[in-house]
Amino acid sequence: MVDLRSDTATRPSAQMRATMAAAEVGDEQRFEDPQVNALCERVAELLGQDAAVFLPSGTMCNAIAFRLHLDRPGSEAILHRTSHPILYEGGQPAAYSAGMVRPLDSPDGTFTGDDVRAAVHDPTNRYAPRSRLVSVEQTANEPGGRLWPLERVDGVLAAAVEHGLRTHLDGARLFNAVVATGTPAERWASGFDSAWIDFSKGLGAPMGACLAGPVGFIEEAWRLKQMTGGALRQAGIVAAAALFALERNVDRLADDHARARTLADGLAQLPGIDIAPAEVETNIVRFGVADPVTWCAELAEHGVLMAPLNATQVRAVTHLDVDDDGIDAALVAAARIAG
């Protein structure tokens, strides 16, 4: 099967597995695991932050960061309406942080500093939630891996400073933005109060993410990690995979981007498919068909997996387990059912 449902479908390579098997480990709770310690130091350096903590998932990174930034019940986070905390985290801003969300809208998953200024509540208005946090998702997953322009991020950060808001970078696919734009991760992340990166998507590790920020923030994040069952003990086995991914699998994201564009260009030639190839900026391809569920089911019968995104659209995500032959096979299968 050619699995294009998500870049979370990646599996550890033989080299990564060997690295994991040979990893020296210790109790991460006592800071005795050399792989975890090295990973946290590496991520903090990459993101231009003071410290970092290794967590099981990116969702836990968001949950802990929101809990710390939304520091009292009823506080509000400003973020795009298609962002991961709103759509894919089980309502964690409300359930875990007792927070409100202020969804902003745009077709490409981004917003501007002026959008933030317009959304901020007057802090003297006791009828409104306290505006407390702005969260940016780079790349924007739901709209199709769209890139936030650097100047737009800078504008949002400037607006946040003007209004005393905290800032958080959801960097689940940050390195896709790094590779696509040539802008270093530190430049994207260092201006935020917290930021995180994921290892289990395009980087190919089996699990894990690192949340970074100031030392005091990370100390409190450790407390919430313990509270929510995130203690991993001899986590060096998976931290070694993450270190391997950072060393070996970042630059090759360019291959995923090129294959996504090849896929989009090929799909655009088929009848019954509505797609704008120019909007494919990284590794996520979105396109419209009449019946996504039926279309994906028929595609699967030809050995290719894609995911219905909603009532009108399908999503395909390129990753390191799908090579050029896999993209060719996907286009052949799509052509068989498109007519």
Image (cartoon, rainbow, N blue to C red):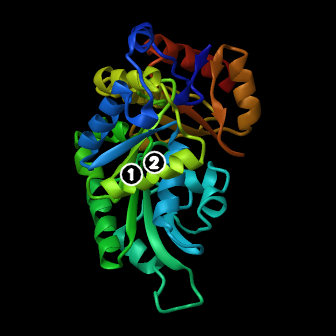
| Residue 73 placement (x, y as % from top left) | 59, 73
Q: Looking at the picture, which amino acid does disc 1 mark?
A: Ile
- Give residue 22's position: percent from left, percent from top: 39, 10
Other-residue count near label 1 (Cα within 10 Å), few / some / many at <14 / 14–19 / ≥20: many
Say which element carries label 1: helix
Pick out the residue farthest to the front.
30
Quadrant where the N terminus sits is: top right
Q: Alpha carbon of mark 2 to alpha carbon of mark 1: how far? A: 6 Å
Q: Closer to the camera, 317 or 219?
A: 219
Q: How many marks?
A: 2
Residue 10 against residue 174 in the figure, above or below: above
In which quadrant will I find the C terminus?
top right
Q: Is residue 256 left or right of residue 231?
A: left
Question: In front here: 236 or 184?
Answer: 236
Relative to 71, say whether 32 is above or below. Answer: above
Label 2 with label 1: CB-CB less than 8 Å: yes
Q: Residue at x 46, y 64 (%)?
A: 69
Q: Which mark is residue 238?
A: none
Circle 2 residue? 222
Where is residue 192 drawn, in percent x and y?
A: 32, 58
| In the rendered image, the vertical position of residue 284 relative to residue 305, given as above or below | below
In the figure, residue 280 lies in which quadrant? top left
Secondary structure found at label 2: helix
Q: Which residue is mark 1?
A: 218
Residue 312 image point, x, y percent = 68, 45
- The residue type indicated by label 2 comes to Trp
Mark yes or no: residue 269 visible: no
Image position of 317 with respect to 155: above or below: above
